[in-house]
Image (cartoon, helix red, strand yellow):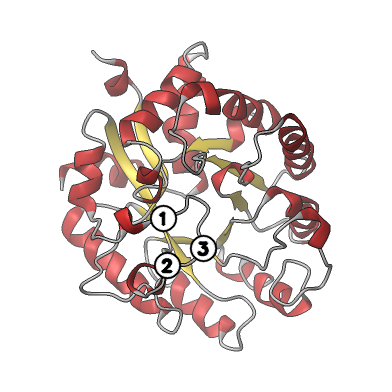
Amino acid sequence: MPEQRVIPIVDAHQHFWDLQANYLPWLRDEPLIPFRYGDYTAIRRNYLPEDLRRDSASFDLVGSVYVEAEWDPTDPLGETRWVHALASREGLPTAMVAQAWLDREDVAELLAAQAGFPLVRGIRHKPKAAPRPADLRRGTAGSMSDPKWREGYALLARHGLSFDLQVVWWHFEEAAELAADFPETQIIVNHTGLPADRSEDGLAQWRRMLATLARQPNVALKISGLGRRDAPWTVEANGPVVRDAISIFGVERCMFASNFPVDSLVGSYSDIFNGFLAITASMPHEHRLKLFCENAKRFYRIEAAAASSAISA
């Protein structure tokens, strides 16, 4: 049996969208926004479960985690309803990270409503971030150290919701403080902490800050989003980053994800998951099973029955 079929995959971070039916400003509006991969015109098209199944056809995809996709911010519940209708028809996704703006006045009501949907496991609200380390300012409105933002964050535990954190690595001291102050809330870091600077010094700083955050036991890491502008996804480029991330966080707290269709800008689904297979080829099977499948099921509380039926719908 081909190796791709031996290890089941729960894709821990992916998106769907129907741009004719729904309003996602960054994908529908002109001009394009500044984006870390550059021109993203190629993904301004519908992407639905049938597309993910086609892209992942070489692999044993048994489930996926839909992460909020910058849907119309005036209608966060509209996205959740649409995803649930999609999952009911198509069997994917098997879990959802929903949208909520933690510093808005209606956050308490919105979190209660989001938590009432059966697929919702967590929330993502990208905190305000500095464009470079020298620009870090504590207490910036919308940041993880903003008291108003933290008031909203404090409500997650009431509903048993985890938090998907997408922020660049130079904010990880701030993130570690957040994790320590709210130990009952599980944080799942998106996209490996965005190590875009692959210089020796850049990677050394990323490793140091990743280690700072890894000291908090309620933080896990999604290894994804490793593309670079104008460069293909390769094992040679990303292997050292993946191995360092696993070494720092440990096998028990890491999980692999495609970030599709966004990362189709830098590689095919096969490029990415065959890359993960190659990078982990020397690991014991039980470790790989955790990275590709079991950890995502555990952190996103995906029932075995739901995962096993996801691809047959």
Q: Secondary structure at mark 2?
A: loop
Tell me: 203 left or right of 14: right
The mark nearer the N terminus, 3 or 1, is: 3
Which quadrant of the structure image shows residue 41?
bottom left
Residue beneath disc 1: 39
Question: Are dots 2 and 1 in contact, CB under 8 Å?
Answer: yes
Question: Which of the 4 image quarters holds residue 117?
Answer: bottom left
Q: Which residue is mark 2?
A: 32
Q: Which residue is mark 3?
A: 34
Mark 2 to mark 3 CA distance (whole Å): 7 Å
Q: Is residue 32 above or below residue 253?
A: below
Q: How far across and how far down the image is residue 225, in percent? A: 50, 44
Q: Amino acid at mark 3?
A: Pro
Q: In the image, is 200 to the left or to the right of 11? A: right
Q: Nearer the viewer, residue 276 or 164?
A: 276
> Which of disc 1 and disc 2 is earlier in sequence?
2
Viewer-proximal residue among 211 and 226: 226
Q: At x 42% / y 72%, what residue is drawn?
A: 116
Residue positioned 80% across, 52% down in the render: 173
Query: Which of the image's four quarters has the N terminus?
Result: top left
Q: Which amino acid type is marked by label 1?
A: Asp
Q: Position of residue 285 (x, y in %)?
A: 45, 16
Residue visible at 21% across and 61% down in the picture: 88
